[in-house]
Image (cartoon, helix red, strand yellow):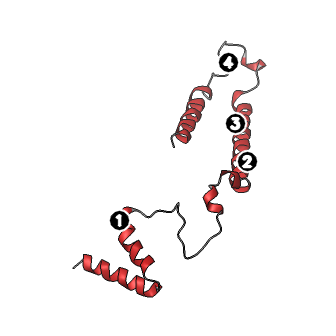
Amino acid sequence: FIFPFIALCIVFIHIFFLHLQGSSNPLGYDTALKIPFYPSLLCLDIKGFNNVLVIFLAQSLFGILPLAHPDNAIVVDRYVTPLHIVPEWYFLPFYAMLKTIPNKTAGLLVMLASLQLLFL
């Protein structure tokens, strides 16, 4: 959870400390003999960002199956809830009403009637 924020902080520290005027010439050499700092390193930063973006997009768009949870590959049965899906405790009464009444419309009406009782 916190790793993206750490990476963002490192990027800001990099930009703040390395992309300052004069930071490319810490020893004081003649600047006429040096390559200008801003264009070359900005291009390298953009190239590095694009490389990371391409790798991230390739993984998230084309290589998602190795990262997927194996329970999501189970063949679906519409009438049976998978074991790894557990409703929250506050939904349990309504979940029980919907599962015990085979007719969907009747189950929905019973659930709405129970909600109506709560507000009386």
Residue 45's tag is: 3
110 up-or-down from 43: above or below: below
What's the residue at 38%, 85% (across, down)? Answer: 109
Marks 2/3: CA–CA distance = 14 Å
| 10 Å crowding of disc 1: few (<14), some (14-19), many (20+) | few
Pick whichever of labels 1 and 2 is earlier in the sequence.
2
The mark that comes first in sequence, 2 or 3, is: 3
> Which callout, 1 or 2, points to the residue nearer the camera?
1
| Three-letter residue code for mark 4 | Asn
| Dot 2 alpha-carbon crowd within 10 angstroms: few under 14, some 14 to 19, many 20 or more | few
Label 1 amino acid?
Tyr
Asked if disc 1 and disc 2 are in contact, CB closer than 8 Å, the reply is: no
- Closer to us: 2 or 27: 2
> x and y percent of residue 58 in the render?
73, 51
Closer to us: 40 or 76: 76
Cα–Cα gap, marks 1 and 4: 64 Å
Which label's residue is closer to the chain start, 1 or 4?
Answer: 4
- Nearer to us of marks 3 and 1 is 1
For the point 56% across and 41% down, the residue is: 4
Location of residue 3 with respect to 113 vertically, above or below: above
Ranked by sequence position, the earlier of labels 3 and 1 is 3
Q: Residues within 10 Å of mark 4 (few under 14, many from 20)?
A: few
Q: Which residue is mark 4?
A: 25
Answer left or right for 68 relative to 8: right
Q: Is residue 34 above or below residue 85?
A: above
Q: CA distance from mark 2 to mark 4?
A: 32 Å
The residue pinned by badge 2 equals 54
Q: Mark 1 = which residue?
A: 90
